[in-house]
């Protein structure tokens, strides 16, 4: 039996909770104050960003939309949607011969191994570029599954139908959609 140091209310910790409180692994708070403290800590933490998703190996023929980048009238990049980069192929040999009793270990780090996780879904980039003029709907580019990260950008870019002007091509083979306000969208294929 104890009084909560935050609200002064009575609470009865379980024997397991008492052991954690005595060991300094748990604060001596009632359930309502513990939940409130947990929510306060979560509000102070930066939002978690998902790792880049896995992309399958394969040859590229230049017909798969890989990146859509929007530029303002001055030519500065505003936002983009992209597929993840193709992962590096794993090295097939080890530094030394494996011995009996050695354990195989996989190292997970934020930048490398998580991008190759086999349980992650494949990222797909959809667009209605071929049909938006006929249907009269806004032009959109959507990444599925939709999420934001610094490697693949935002989940969706949408432009009103009447804001899209003429289409041109640059020397690298990228498609340029000129918008009526002077900005443009660059579509890169791989």
Image: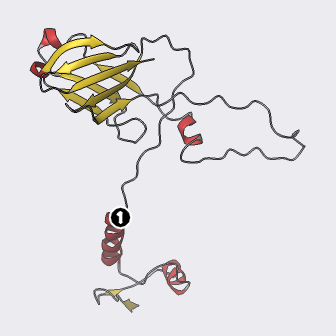
For image coordinates 87% across by 40% down, the residue present is: 96
User: Looking at the image, which is closer to me, 95 or 15?
Assistant: 95
For image coordinates 33% across by 20% down, the residue present is: 187
Locate residue 45, reporting x and y percent. Answer: 37, 63
Left or right: 189 as drawn, with respect to 59: left
Quarter of the image with the C terminus in it: top left
In the picture, residue 144 is in which quadrant?
top left
Locate residue 165, reporting x and y percent. Answer: 15, 16
Q: Is residue 172 above or below residue 7?
A: above
Quarter of the image with the N terminus in it: bottom left
Residue tagged 1: 42
Q: Residues within 10 Å of mark 1 (few under 14, many from 20)?
A: few
Which element carries disc 1, helix, strand or loop? Answer: helix
User: Looking at the image, which is closer to me, 129 or 167?
Assistant: 167
For image coordinates 34% across by 31% down, the residue present is: 81
Locate residue 128, reporting x and y percent. Answer: 25, 16
Locate residue 124, reporting x and y percent. Answer: 40, 24
The coloring applied to the image is: secondary structure
Left or right: 80 as drawn, with respect to 49: left
User: Looking at the image, which is closer to me, 98 or 173?
Assistant: 173
């Amino acid at each position: 039996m104890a009084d909560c140091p935050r609200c002064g209310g009575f609470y009865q910790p379980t024997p397991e909770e008492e052991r954690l409180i005595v060991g300094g692994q748990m604060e001596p708070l009632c359930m309502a104050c513990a939940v409130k403290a947990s929510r306060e800590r979560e509000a102070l933490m930066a939002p978690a960003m998902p790792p880049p998703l896995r992309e399958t190996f394969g040859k590229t023929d230049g017909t798969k939309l890989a990146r859509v980048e929007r530029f303002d009238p001055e030519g500065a990049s505003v936002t983009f949607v992209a597929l993840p980069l193709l992962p590096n192929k794993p090295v097939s040999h080890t530094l030394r011969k494996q011995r009996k009793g050695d354990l195989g270990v996989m190292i997970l780090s934020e930048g490398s191994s998580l991008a190759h996780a086999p349980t992650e879904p494949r990222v797909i980039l959809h667009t209605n570029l071929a049909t938006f003029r006929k249907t009269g709907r806004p032009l959109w580019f959507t990444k599925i599954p939709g999420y934001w990260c610094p490697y693949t950008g935002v989940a969706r870019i949408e432009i009103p139908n009447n804001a899209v002007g003429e289409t041109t091509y640059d020397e690298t083979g990228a498609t340029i959609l000129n918008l009526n306000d002077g900005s443009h969208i660059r579509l890169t294929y791989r």
